[in-house]
Image (cartoon, rainbow, N blue to C red):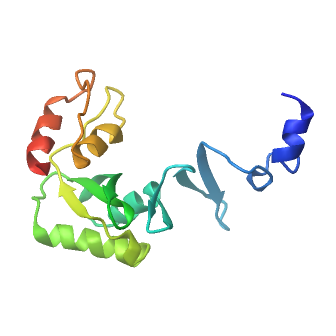
Amino acid sequence: MNNQYYKRYCKDPNSKDWRDWPYLTGDAAVQAPDGYYRILGRIDDVINVSGHRLGTKELESAALTVVEVAEAAVVPVADEIKGKVPDLYVSLKPGFKPSKDIEDRIIKALVFEIGPIAKPRKVWIVPDMPKTRSGKIMRRVLGSLSNKKDVGDVMTLANPEIVEAIHKMVD
């Protein structure tokens, strides 16, 4: 690209500082005063709820503050009034059973950590998350289930049977 492009959209084309660029994708981290890095997750992975941009990683991290929660995944769901709202899927650590009390504590954790705007539409306590063979949670599948859309081909998942189990819960 020519240099005019950079002058138009970037303060300094040689800068590595994200503030000099108008749009940045990828993962982000911040360094805490003690020298440790805090992983923030995908910069562009946000849910716009009534004009509030909520980071999915922050929502998931807040859910993980509940002792019983092993994994969490947040997906956006279409809403007539708010535009999008979060649906939260969690799987529990071994030995814990799903309960209304755990759901309530997860919701309270999100409200405490982020604020009332972060309250999910629904907390789904699932037996396991749909994952790739490498262990990555397939949020695309969960989003399709929450939005009542076709999940597409799930045969390449490490646990394709879990999709049907979650589908029965969501319907």
Tally of numbered tags: 0
Horizontal side, residue 90 vs residue 41: left or right: left
Q: Residue furthest top?
A: 156
- Residue 153 vertical position relative to residue 109 in the rendered view, above or below: above
Query: Residue 154 placed where, x, y %?
Result: 24, 26
Query: Residue 163 placed where, x, y %?
Result: 17, 36
Residue 13 falls in image quadrant? top right
Horizontal side, residue 120 vs residue 54: left or right: left
Looking at the rendered image, the quarter that the N terminus falls into is: top right
Q: Name the residue at 31% across, 26% down.
A: 133
- Residue 157 vertical position relative to residue 83 in the rendered view, above or below: above
Q: Nearer the viewer, residue 32 or 13?
A: 13
Horizontal side, residue 46 vs residue 15: left or right: left
Q: Name the residue at 25% across, 24% down.
A: 153
Q: Name the residue at 34% across, 67% down.
A: 81
Q: Nearer the viewer, residue 79 or 110?
A: 79
- Residue 77 vertical position relative to residue 105 in the rendered view, above or below: above
Query: Residue 146 placed where, x, y %?
Result: 24, 49
- Residue 106 vertical position relative to residue 27 in the rendered view, above or below: below
Q: Is residue 41 visible?
A: yes
Q: Is residue 13 visible?
A: no
Q: Residue furthest front?
A: 80
Q: Name the residue at 85% across, 37% down.
A: 5
Query: Residue 83 placed where, x, y %?
Result: 39, 61
